[in-house]
Amino acid sequence: GDSVTQMEGPVTLSEEAFLTINCTYTATGYPSLFWYVQYPGEGLQLLLKATKADDKGSNKGFEATYRKETTSFHLEKGSVQVSDSAVYFCALNNAGNNRKLIWGLGTSLAVNP
Amino acid sequence: GAGVSQTPSNKVTEKGKYVELRCDPISGHTALYWYRQSLGQGPEFLIYFQGTGAADDSGLPNDRFFAVRPEGSVSTLKIQRTERGDSAVYLCASSPGMGKNIQYFGAGTRLSVL
């Protein structure tokens, strides 16, 4: 079945450092790919998405490119801030699977001043 | 409402008791999903409604779990004879349907079974 493998955390960075969180997937057909973020004490929020190969999703300085050849959707940010401290989840859904989201385990990010 | 609303935000119950968790989706959203998130894990799919009907209940762990959405809006997740292993955060998400596949999540209900 469909699955998502996500880089394990926790990740600890200093402010203004470069961030990469790796995500790879296994899926039939043409899934849509998502990054969700969960800030401390809050619910899951959509960060960005991509619906087809070579699409780049971007939001709040974060970017991820849908790479079908490597089945990857790595999350990057050029300069992290303390306010980016959160748990990041990679997920996919598939029209052939009722669009239910299949999730990675999440990666905890802590950014120190 | 402005977003997906879940009540209660926290529920503490004793092993063997019955609980109901409520989800009020974004107005007009036809698709509704329930997920369960255990500590340190990603969410796991439980059940999906399109309108009033459960289109996919393949994620329900056993027959103690049941969900309804009688009027195609509010949904209730029902757990009978709760067990300690049911302790988790139960998440509800809604989506416009009709090919628009972004899911919007509520804050969740944290269930603790003592």
Image (cartoon, helix red, strand yellow):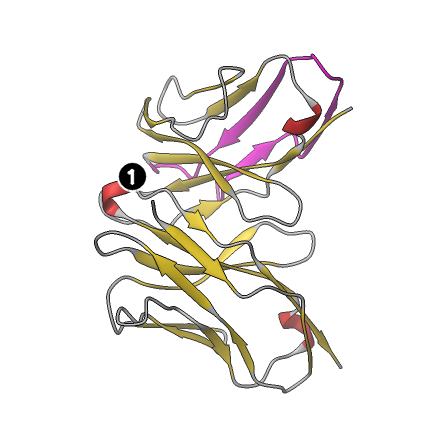
At 31% from the left and 49% from the top, the residue drawn is B101
Residue at point 67%, 66% (across, down): A10
- Relative to B66, is B54 on the left or the right? left
B28 in magenta: yes
Q: The disc numbered 1 marks a residue on which chain?
A: A
Where is mark 1, residue-wise? A98
Q: Position of residue B96 (x, y in %)?
A: 32, 43
User: Measured along the vertical axis of the image, is residue B28 above or below residue A82?
Assistant: above
Magenta-drawn stretch contains A38: no
Residue type at numbered disc 1: Asn
Q: Quadrant of the N terminus of chain A?
A: top left
Image quadrant holding the C terminus of chain A, namely bottom right
Q: Position of residue A64 (x, y in %)?
A: 40, 73
**Element assignment for label 1:** loop
Residue located at (44% from left, 47% from top): B104
- Residue numbers of the magenta segment: B1-29
Q: How many marks?
A: 1
Please rate how many residues cluster around mark 1, counting C-alpha atoms within 10 Å: few if below 14, some from 14 to 19, many from 20: some
Q: Quadrant of residue B38?
A: top right
